[in-house]
Amino acid sequence: MPASILSSGPEAYQRAADILKRGGLVGLPTETVYGLAGDARSPAAVDLIYAVKGRPAHNPLITHVLRPEDTCRLAHVSKSAEALMTAFWPGPLTLVLPRRGPQPKTAAGAGLPTIALRCPDAPWRDGLIKAGFSGQLVMPSANLSGHVSPTTAAHVAADLGDKIELIIDGGPCKAGVESTILKIEKDYAMLLRPGSLPHEAFVPFISDLRLPKRGSQISAPGMLASHYAPKARVRLNAAAKNSGEAYLGFGPYSVDADINLSPTADINEAAQNLYSALRALDTVGVIAVAPIPETGIGAALNDRLRRAAAAR
Ligand code: TXA
Ligand code: MG
Protein backbone atom coordinates (compact mmCIF):
# COMPACT_ATOMS: atom_id res chain seq x y z
CA MET A 1 0.00 0.00 0.00
CA PRO A 2 1.41 3.45 -0.84
CA ALA A 3 2.26 5.79 2.05
CA SER A 4 -0.50 8.01 3.44
CA ILE A 5 0.30 11.72 3.13
CA LEU A 6 -1.08 13.81 6.00
CA SER A 7 -0.70 17.57 6.49
CA SER A 8 1.29 18.73 9.54
CA GLY A 9 -0.95 18.82 12.62
CA PRO A 10 -1.93 16.88 15.75
CA GLU A 11 -3.55 13.97 13.86
CA ALA A 12 -0.45 13.47 11.72
CA TYR A 13 1.86 13.69 14.76
CA GLN A 14 -0.19 11.05 16.60
CA ARG A 15 -0.01 8.66 13.62
CA ALA A 16 3.73 9.32 13.35
CA ALA A 17 4.34 8.72 17.07
CA ASP A 18 2.44 5.40 16.92
CA ILE A 19 4.43 4.24 13.89
CA LEU A 20 7.78 5.29 15.40
CA LYS A 21 7.01 3.54 18.71
CA ARG A 22 6.56 0.21 16.95
CA GLY A 23 9.79 0.56 14.95
CA GLY A 24 8.28 1.89 11.70
CA LEU A 25 9.49 4.77 9.51
CA VAL A 26 7.93 8.15 8.74
CA GLY A 27 8.81 10.84 6.18
CA LEU A 28 9.09 14.20 8.00
CA PRO A 29 9.51 17.77 6.76
CA THR A 30 12.37 19.86 8.14
CA GLU A 31 13.62 23.35 7.38
CA THR A 32 16.37 21.86 5.18
CA VAL A 33 15.04 18.79 3.32
CA TYR A 34 12.57 16.00 4.09
CA GLY A 35 13.92 13.23 6.33
CA LEU A 36 13.23 9.51 6.73
CA ALA A 37 12.78 9.11 10.49
CA GLY A 38 13.02 6.08 12.76
CA ASP A 39 13.43 5.58 16.52
CA ALA A 40 17.17 5.89 17.22
CA ARG A 41 16.96 3.20 19.94
CA SER A 42 15.41 0.57 17.67
CA PRO A 43 17.89 -1.69 15.84
CA ALA A 44 15.03 -2.85 13.58
CA ALA A 45 14.09 0.71 12.61
CA VAL A 46 17.74 1.58 11.89
CA ASP A 47 18.19 -1.54 9.74
CA LEU A 48 15.01 -0.67 7.88
CA ILE A 49 16.31 2.85 7.10
CA TYR A 50 19.47 1.41 5.50
CA ALA A 51 17.40 -1.17 3.57
CA VAL A 52 14.70 1.24 2.34
CA LYS A 53 17.24 3.83 1.13
CA GLY A 54 19.77 1.32 -0.18
CA ARG A 55 22.31 3.18 1.96
CA PRO A 56 25.82 1.74 2.45
CA ALA A 57 26.35 0.50 6.03
CA HIS A 58 29.54 2.63 6.46
CA ASN A 59 27.52 5.85 6.17
CA PRO A 60 26.41 6.88 9.69
CA LEU A 61 23.07 8.56 10.46
CA ILE A 62 22.42 11.94 12.09
CA THR A 63 20.60 11.67 15.44
CA HIS A 64 17.87 14.32 15.74
CA VAL A 65 16.96 15.44 19.24
CA LEU A 66 13.46 16.67 20.06
CA ARG A 67 14.87 18.89 22.83
CA PRO A 68 18.34 20.50 22.78
CA GLU A 69 18.95 19.36 26.38
CA ASP A 70 18.81 15.68 25.29
CA THR A 71 22.25 16.21 23.75
CA CYS A 72 24.13 16.00 27.07
CA ARG A 73 23.17 12.34 27.51
CA LEU A 74 24.41 11.42 24.05
CA ALA A 75 27.63 13.40 23.64
CA HIS A 76 30.36 15.29 25.46
CA VAL A 77 29.41 18.93 24.88
CA SER A 78 32.32 21.39 24.96
CA LYS A 79 31.88 25.09 25.75
CA SER A 80 32.10 26.05 22.06
CA ALA A 81 29.60 23.34 21.08
CA GLU A 82 27.24 24.63 23.74
CA ALA A 83 27.55 28.19 22.43
CA LEU A 84 26.78 27.01 18.90
CA MET A 85 23.74 25.05 20.09
CA THR A 86 22.44 28.09 21.95
CA ALA A 87 22.93 30.32 18.93
CA PHE A 88 21.68 28.05 16.15
CA TRP A 89 19.32 25.39 17.56
CA PRO A 90 16.67 24.63 16.60
CA GLY A 91 18.09 25.10 13.12
CA PRO A 92 20.10 23.74 10.21
CA LEU A 93 23.34 22.95 12.06
CA THR A 94 24.58 19.40 12.70
CA LEU A 95 27.35 19.05 15.28
CA VAL A 96 29.71 16.07 15.31
CA LEU A 97 30.76 15.51 18.93
CA PRO A 98 32.52 12.79 20.94
CA ARG A 99 29.95 10.10 21.72
CA ARG A 100 29.10 9.57 25.39
CA GLY A 101 29.04 5.94 26.49
CA PRO A 102 29.46 2.78 24.43
CA GLN A 103 28.49 2.25 20.79
CA PRO A 104 24.73 1.92 20.39
CA LYS A 105 23.17 -1.49 19.75
CA THR A 106 22.03 -0.21 16.37
CA ALA A 107 24.03 0.19 13.15
CA ALA A 108 23.48 3.99 13.09
CA GLY A 109 26.90 4.99 14.44
CA ALA A 110 28.94 3.01 11.87
CA GLY A 111 31.39 2.18 14.67
CA LEU A 112 32.60 5.80 15.04
CA PRO A 113 33.65 7.36 18.38
CA THR A 114 31.63 10.45 17.41
CA ILE A 115 27.92 11.16 17.01
CA ALA A 116 26.27 13.68 14.65
CA LEU A 117 23.47 15.63 16.36
CA ARG A 118 20.91 18.10 15.13
CA CYS A 119 17.79 19.77 16.53
CA PRO A 120 15.63 20.72 13.54
CA ASP A 121 13.32 23.73 13.45
CA ALA A 122 10.08 21.81 13.00
CA PRO A 123 6.69 21.82 14.76
CA TRP A 124 6.57 18.00 14.93
CA ARG A 125 9.21 18.00 17.70
CA ASP A 126 6.60 19.22 20.19
CA GLY A 127 3.87 17.31 18.37
CA LEU A 128 5.63 13.96 18.81
CA ILE A 129 6.34 14.61 22.49
CA LYS A 130 2.66 15.47 23.10
CA ALA A 131 1.68 12.31 21.21
CA GLY A 132 3.83 10.14 23.50
CA PHE A 133 7.12 9.74 21.59
CA SER A 134 10.00 11.43 23.36
CA GLY A 135 13.07 9.53 22.12
CA GLN A 136 15.57 10.58 19.47
CA LEU A 137 15.18 10.12 15.73
CA VAL A 138 17.76 8.90 13.28
CA MET A 139 16.88 10.68 10.08
CA PRO A 140 18.77 10.72 6.79
CA SER A 141 17.31 12.63 3.87
CA ALA A 142 14.23 10.78 2.54
CA ASN A 143 15.61 9.89 -0.90
CA LEU A 144 17.06 6.72 -2.37
CA SER A 145 20.78 6.63 -1.59
CA GLY A 146 22.79 8.79 -4.00
CA HIS A 147 19.72 10.53 -5.42
CA VAL A 148 18.75 14.19 -5.08
CA SER A 149 17.32 15.06 -1.62
CA PRO A 150 13.56 15.70 -1.36
CA THR A 151 12.16 19.15 -0.64
CA THR A 152 8.44 18.29 -0.96
CA ALA A 153 6.23 15.44 0.25
CA ALA A 154 5.70 14.47 -3.39
CA HIS A 155 9.47 13.98 -3.81
CA VAL A 156 9.47 11.62 -0.81
CA ALA A 157 6.51 9.71 -2.24
CA ALA A 158 8.28 9.39 -5.60
CA ASP A 159 11.41 7.80 -4.04
CA LEU A 160 10.01 5.88 -1.05
CA GLY A 161 6.20 5.98 -1.21
CA ASP A 162 5.84 2.24 -1.71
CA LYS A 163 8.21 1.43 1.17
CA ILE A 164 6.97 3.52 4.12
CA GLU A 165 3.59 4.02 5.80
CA LEU A 166 3.34 7.76 6.37
CA ILE A 167 4.68 11.02 5.00
CA ILE A 168 3.87 14.27 6.81
CA ASP A 169 3.40 17.14 4.37
CA GLY A 170 4.75 20.44 5.70
CA GLY A 171 4.92 22.13 2.29
CA PRO A 172 8.17 22.95 0.44
CA CYS A 173 11.27 23.15 2.68
CA LYS A 174 12.32 26.66 3.67
CA ALA A 175 16.08 26.29 3.07
CA GLY A 176 16.19 23.61 0.38
CA VAL A 177 19.66 22.17 1.04
CA GLU A 178 20.82 19.96 3.92
CA SER A 179 22.15 21.12 7.28
CA THR A 180 25.71 22.36 7.67
CA ILE A 181 27.87 19.71 9.41
CA LEU A 182 30.57 20.96 11.78
CA LYS A 183 32.93 18.63 13.64
CA ILE A 184 34.06 20.02 16.97
CA GLU A 185 37.62 19.00 17.90
CA LYS A 186 39.50 20.02 21.04
CA ASP A 187 41.21 23.12 19.64
CA TYR A 188 39.43 23.72 16.36
CA ALA A 189 36.31 22.97 14.32
CA MET A 190 36.16 21.43 10.87
CA LEU A 191 33.43 22.06 8.33
CA LEU A 192 32.48 18.59 7.04
CA ARG A 193 29.55 19.59 4.83
CA PRO A 194 28.63 23.10 3.68
CA GLY A 195 24.87 23.51 4.13
CA SER A 196 21.98 25.85 4.79
CA LEU A 197 23.83 27.77 7.46
CA PRO A 198 26.79 29.61 5.85
CA HIS A 199 30.07 28.90 7.65
CA GLU A 200 30.65 32.64 8.15
CA ALA A 201 28.03 32.38 10.93
CA PHE A 202 30.49 30.33 13.06
CA VAL A 203 33.32 32.86 13.05
CA PRO A 204 32.27 34.60 16.31
CA PHE A 205 32.16 31.22 18.10
CA ILE A 206 35.18 29.33 16.77
CA SER A 207 38.68 30.83 16.77
CA ASP A 208 40.12 28.11 14.51
CA LEU A 209 37.52 27.21 11.86
CA ARG A 210 38.92 24.89 9.19
CA LEU A 211 37.28 24.62 5.79
CA PRO A 212 37.77 21.78 3.32
CA LYS A 213 40.02 22.75 0.41
CA ARG A 214 37.96 23.97 -2.52
CA GLY A 215 37.34 21.00 -4.80
CA SER A 216 38.36 18.46 -2.17
CA GLN A 217 35.60 15.91 -1.95
CA ILE A 218 35.26 13.30 0.76
CA SER A 219 35.12 14.80 4.20
CA ALA A 220 32.26 13.21 6.14
CA PRO A 221 32.32 9.40 6.09
CA GLY A 222 29.86 8.31 3.45
CA MET A 223 30.02 11.60 1.59
CA LEU A 224 30.94 10.27 -1.79
CA ALA A 225 32.18 12.49 -4.61
CA SER A 226 29.28 11.34 -6.74
CA HIS A 227 26.18 11.98 -4.67
CA TYR A 228 23.08 14.15 -4.65
CA ALA A 229 22.80 13.25 -8.32
CA PRO A 230 20.04 13.17 -10.91
CA LYS A 231 20.24 10.44 -13.57
CA ALA A 232 21.15 13.04 -16.18
CA ARG A 233 24.75 14.17 -16.67
CA VAL A 234 25.35 17.63 -15.19
CA ARG A 235 27.45 20.30 -16.94
CA LEU A 236 28.51 23.18 -14.67
CA ASN A 237 29.20 26.89 -15.25
CA ALA A 238 27.34 26.81 -18.54
CA ALA A 239 26.79 30.34 -19.91
CA ALA A 240 24.30 28.97 -22.42
CA LYS A 241 22.61 25.76 -23.46
CA ASN A 242 23.86 23.40 -26.17
CA SER A 243 21.42 21.57 -28.38
CA GLY A 244 19.74 18.63 -26.68
CA GLU A 245 20.50 19.92 -23.17
CA ALA A 246 18.11 21.21 -20.54
CA TYR A 247 19.24 24.55 -19.11
CA LEU A 248 19.02 25.49 -15.46
CA GLY A 249 19.34 29.27 -15.35
CA PHE A 250 20.20 31.69 -12.57
CA GLY A 251 19.54 35.44 -12.59
CA PRO A 252 20.70 36.97 -15.89
CA TYR A 253 21.66 33.54 -17.28
CA SER A 254 18.10 33.10 -18.44
CA VAL A 255 18.15 32.77 -22.24
CA ASP A 256 16.50 29.47 -23.18
CA ALA A 257 16.37 28.44 -19.51
CA ASP A 258 14.01 25.52 -18.93
CA ILE A 259 13.91 26.59 -15.27
CA ASN A 260 15.50 29.69 -13.73
CA LEU A 261 16.53 29.00 -10.11
CA SER A 262 16.02 32.67 -9.29
CA PRO A 263 15.22 35.28 -11.96
CA THR A 264 16.27 38.01 -9.48
CA ALA A 265 19.59 36.22 -8.69
CA ASP A 266 18.55 35.61 -5.06
CA ILE A 267 20.82 32.82 -3.81
CA ASN A 268 18.39 31.73 -1.05
CA GLU A 269 15.55 31.38 -3.55
CA ALA A 270 17.89 29.38 -5.78
CA ALA A 271 18.61 27.01 -2.89
CA GLN A 272 14.89 26.49 -2.26
CA ASN A 273 14.40 25.55 -5.91
CA LEU A 274 17.56 23.55 -6.68
CA TYR A 275 16.49 19.98 -5.87
CA SER A 276 12.97 20.40 -7.34
CA ALA A 277 14.53 21.73 -10.52
CA LEU A 278 17.05 18.88 -10.80
CA ARG A 279 14.23 16.38 -10.34
CA ALA A 280 11.98 18.15 -12.87
CA LEU A 281 14.69 18.33 -15.56
CA ASP A 282 15.83 14.75 -15.04
CA THR A 283 14.21 13.52 -18.26
CA VAL A 284 17.06 14.59 -20.55
CA GLY A 285 20.63 13.37 -21.14
CA VAL A 286 22.42 16.50 -19.91
CA ILE A 287 21.43 19.31 -17.54
CA ALA A 288 23.55 22.41 -18.14
CA VAL A 289 23.70 24.70 -15.11
CA ALA A 290 24.40 28.45 -15.12
CA PRO A 291 27.24 29.82 -12.95
CA ILE A 292 26.06 30.14 -9.33
CA PRO A 293 27.81 32.53 -6.90
CA GLU A 294 29.67 30.99 -3.93
CA THR A 295 28.34 33.54 -1.44
CA GLY A 296 26.28 32.51 1.59
CA ILE A 297 24.27 29.35 0.94
CA GLY A 298 25.81 29.39 -2.56
CA ALA A 299 28.79 27.42 -1.17
CA ALA A 300 26.40 24.55 -0.39
CA LEU A 301 24.68 24.80 -3.77
CA ASN A 302 27.98 24.63 -5.60
CA ASP A 303 29.14 21.70 -3.42
CA ARG A 304 25.99 19.72 -4.32
CA LEU A 305 26.25 20.66 -8.00
CA ARG A 306 29.93 19.56 -8.13
CA ARG A 307 28.93 16.23 -6.59
CA ALA A 308 26.03 15.87 -9.04
CA ALA A 309 28.48 16.51 -11.89
CA ALA A 310 31.20 14.13 -10.62
CA ALA A 311 31.92 11.08 -12.75
CA ARG A 312 29.83 8.05 -11.78
O1 TXA B 1 19.52 18.58 6.82
C1 TXA B 1 19.89 17.45 7.13
O2 TXA B 1 20.92 17.23 7.78
C2 TXA B 1 18.97 16.29 6.71
C3 TXA B 1 17.66 16.43 7.46
C4 TXA B 1 16.70 15.30 7.16
O3 TXA B 1 17.88 16.54 8.83
N1 TXA B 1 19.62 15.03 6.96
C5 TXA B 1 20.65 14.59 6.19
O4 TXA B 1 21.07 13.31 6.52
O5 TXA B 1 21.15 15.24 5.30
P1 TXA B 1 21.99 12.43 5.53
O6 TXA B 1 22.02 11.09 6.16
O7 TXA B 1 21.45 12.50 4.15
O8 TXA B 1 23.40 13.08 5.64
C6 TXA B 1 24.10 12.97 6.85
C7 TXA B 1 25.56 13.11 6.66
C8 TXA B 1 26.19 11.95 5.94
O9 TXA B 1 27.08 12.45 4.97
C9 TXA B 1 26.94 11.21 7.03
O10 TXA B 1 28.09 10.57 6.53
C10 TXA B 1 27.30 12.34 7.99
O11 TXA B 1 26.16 13.15 7.98
N2 TXA B 1 27.55 11.85 9.37
C11 TXA B 1 26.72 11.19 10.19
N3 TXA B 1 27.34 10.86 11.35
C12 TXA B 1 28.59 11.34 11.27
C13 TXA B 1 29.74 11.34 12.15
N4 TXA B 1 29.70 10.76 13.34
N5 TXA B 1 30.86 11.95 11.72
C14 TXA B 1 30.91 12.56 10.51
N6 TXA B 1 29.87 12.59 9.62
C15 TXA B 1 28.73 11.99 10.00
MG1 MG C 1 21.27 12.46 2.18
Image: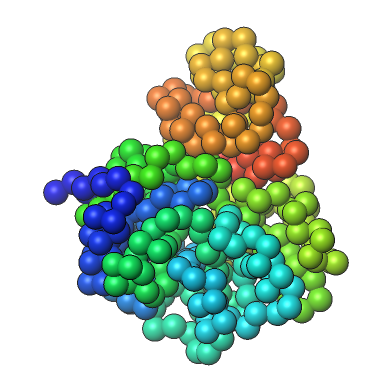
Judging from the image, the colouring scheme is: rainbow
Across and down, in percent, residue 225 comes to: 60, 50
The percent coordinates of residue 154 (x first, y second) are 33, 38
The location of residue 27, given as percent across then percent down, is 34, 53
Residue 159 is at least partly visible in this image: no
At a point 57% along the width and 57% down the height, the residue shown is 91
133 and 56: which is toward the camera: 133
Q: Is residue 74 visible?
A: yes
Residue 33 image point, x, y percent: 48, 47
Q: Residue furthest left?
A: 1
In the shown orientation, is residue 57 left or right of residue 245?
A: left
Q: Residue furthest right?
A: 207
Observer-nearest of 164 and 9: 9
Pick the residue in front: 105 or 70: 70
Q: Compared to 206, does 146 lie above or below?
A: above
Residue sitting at x 72%, y 42% = 296
Residue at 54% from the left image edge and 36% from the top image edge: 272
Q: Which residue occupies 33% across, 49% down?
A: 8
Marker count (numbered): 0
Q: Quadrant of residue 261?
A: top right
